[in-house]
């Protein structure tokens, strides 16, 4: 089998488990994660002293527990993600911090959890320092800095520059350091993240910015974070990131910072999509084939309520066919657009940014065959919704050839479990 099976036009297995059996046992639509792919990507980052997983990419408890066993620590961007980290077995405190809360604000639940558990905070705005001091007194903190530039696979994933709300503006660092001292905080870390799905050229610019920022940060600095944004290939022709070169750039940067400060500085990296994207597949069943003028459509039982990236970013995902009769022939093929069941014109998986529908050349298939959407492990299930009152899809982790249900399909009663009808409107 290809080392990147998600680019195969016809796909029969995920992690050694037959796809038709997964669909039969768990139903469709269905998310499946291949643990072996996650572990392989984690191994590629061994050169980095600290790997901190950005769990917003895929926060299923089983995925977090898998990474915890591999020595990966966590980034949390909400109160819910702090709770997830603790539930997955991460301790609240340690060195390096097992969980870091990274955000541009404290909502009240997050501030309460941070104060109660002593969670380390990566402050993305000056006001957070004041609120943390009021809730928990002076603390060791990290500052997330917006270096004044950014880059990403979409403008919506660009997290640097004036168009981004993220981070403390780089020119405000001196004032923030003085503010931290007044509040009793000690700035021990600096973090810069410019966007998701960027390239080596732009990632390298972060190294230069970090050197200048670290020189201002002062003698208490103990670690720097390169952020995340490491790209993964969504198309067969997409290049792999030169991880050895990327590590060399940051290692050299870290050594120069150490020389200027006169003490050791630890390097962290914060991948999200890089660790999990390629592990994930969305299995969906073709339920109708339609001819709309010159365009042929396959309509499947998954929609943007299950995978929102195409409608949000015009994102491309590779697609494979798994036929119910077991045929593995890739030809003949046909040009088709793939859409979902939602009452929404934008519910199309083959679209470009701006909402333009495009067709994809796929092996011929029909009603009852399965379509497998690949590289769906990052920003897939975590962005699921109940739009059109659709239940959240189940998630399965394939570990050493065995499928494990790690989130069951949402039940009908759960769709409205938190809702209630006022007595005045109740049926007589």
Image (cartoon, helix red, strand yellow):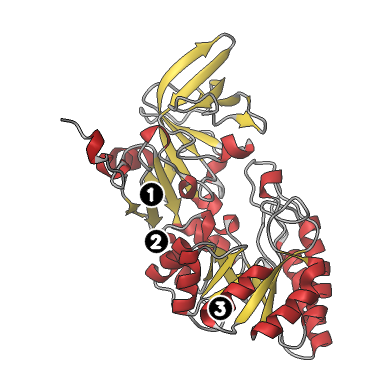
Residue 243: image location, x then y, percent? 70, 63
Q: Quadrant of the rendered structure where residue 284 is?
A: top left
Secondary structure type for disc 3: helix
Q: In screen coordinates, is 23 left or right of 84?
A: left
> Residue 62's mark?
2
Residue 397: image location, x then y, percent? 39, 54
Q: Quick check: marks 1 and 2 in contact, CB under 8 Å?
A: yes
Mark 2 or mark 3: whose residue is earlier in sequence = 2
Q: Is residue 290 above or below residue 16?
A: above
Secondary structure type for disc 2: helix
- Label 3: how many Cα within 10 Å (few below 14, some 14–19, many 20+): few
Q: Write the residue at 46% across / 71% down.
A: 112
> Residue 134's mark?
3
Callout in the foreground (3, 1): 3
Q: State whether residue 170 appears in this view.
A: yes
**Whole-number angstrom distance, CA of label 1 to CA of label 2:** 10 Å
Residue 196: image location, x then y, percent? 66, 53
Mark 1 or mark 2: whose residue is earlier in sequence = 2
Residue 360: image location, x then y, percent? 59, 26
Quadrant of the frame with the C terminus? top left
């Amino acid at each position: 089998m290809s080392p990147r099976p998600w680019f195969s036009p016809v796909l029969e297995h995920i992690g050694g488990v037959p796809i038709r059996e997964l669909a039969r046992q768990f139903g469709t639509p269905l998310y499946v994660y291949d643990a072996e792919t996650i572990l392989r990507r984690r191994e590629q980052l061994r050169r980095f002293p600290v790997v901190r997983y950005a769990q917003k990419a895929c926060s299923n408890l089983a995925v977090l527990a898998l990474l915890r066993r591999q020595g990966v620590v966590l980034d949390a961007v909400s109160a819910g993600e702090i709770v997830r980290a603790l539930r997955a077995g991460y301790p609240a405190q340690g060195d390096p911090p097992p969980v870091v809360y990274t955000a541009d604000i404290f909502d009240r639940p997050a501030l309460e959890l941070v104060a109660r558990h002593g969670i380390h905070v990566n402050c993305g705005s000056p006001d957070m320092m004041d609120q943390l001091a009021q809730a928990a007194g002076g603390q060791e903190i990290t500052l997330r800095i917006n270096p004044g530039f950014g880059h990403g696979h979409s403008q919506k994933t660009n997290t640097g520059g004036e168009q981004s709300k993220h981070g403390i503006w780089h020119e405000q660092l001196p004032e923030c350091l003085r503010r931290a001292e007044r509040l009793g905080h000690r700035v021990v870390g600096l973090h810069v993240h410019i966007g998701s799905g960027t390239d080596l050229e732009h990632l390298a610019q972060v190294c230069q910015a970090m050197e200048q920022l670290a020189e201002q940060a002062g003698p208490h600095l103990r670690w720097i974070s390169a952020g995340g944004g490491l790209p993964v290939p969504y198309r067969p022709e997409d290049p792999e990131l030169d991880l050895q070169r990327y590590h060399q750039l940051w290692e050299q940067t870290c050594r120069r910072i150490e020389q200027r400060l006169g003490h050791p500085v630890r390097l962290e990296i914060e991948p999200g999509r890089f660790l999990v994207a390629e592990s994930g597949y969305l299995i969906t069943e073709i339920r109708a084939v339609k001819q709309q003028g010159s365009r042929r459509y396959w309509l499947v039982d998954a929609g943007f309520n299950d995978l929102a990236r195409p409608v949000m970013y015009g994102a491309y995902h590779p697609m494979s066919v798994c036929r119910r009769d077991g045929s593995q022939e890739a030809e003949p093929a046909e040009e088709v657009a793939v859409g979902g069941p939602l009452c929404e014109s934008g519910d199309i998986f083959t679209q470009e940014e701006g909402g333009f529908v495009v067709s994809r050349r796929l092996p011929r298939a029909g009603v009852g065959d399965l379509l497998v959407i690949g590289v769906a492990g990052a920003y897939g299930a975590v962005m699921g919704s109940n739009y059109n009152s659709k239940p959240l899809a189940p998630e399965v982790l394939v570990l050493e050839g065995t499928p494990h249900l790690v989130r069951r399909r949402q039940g009908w009663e759960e769709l409205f479990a938190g809702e209630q009808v006022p007595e005045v409107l109740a049926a007589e």
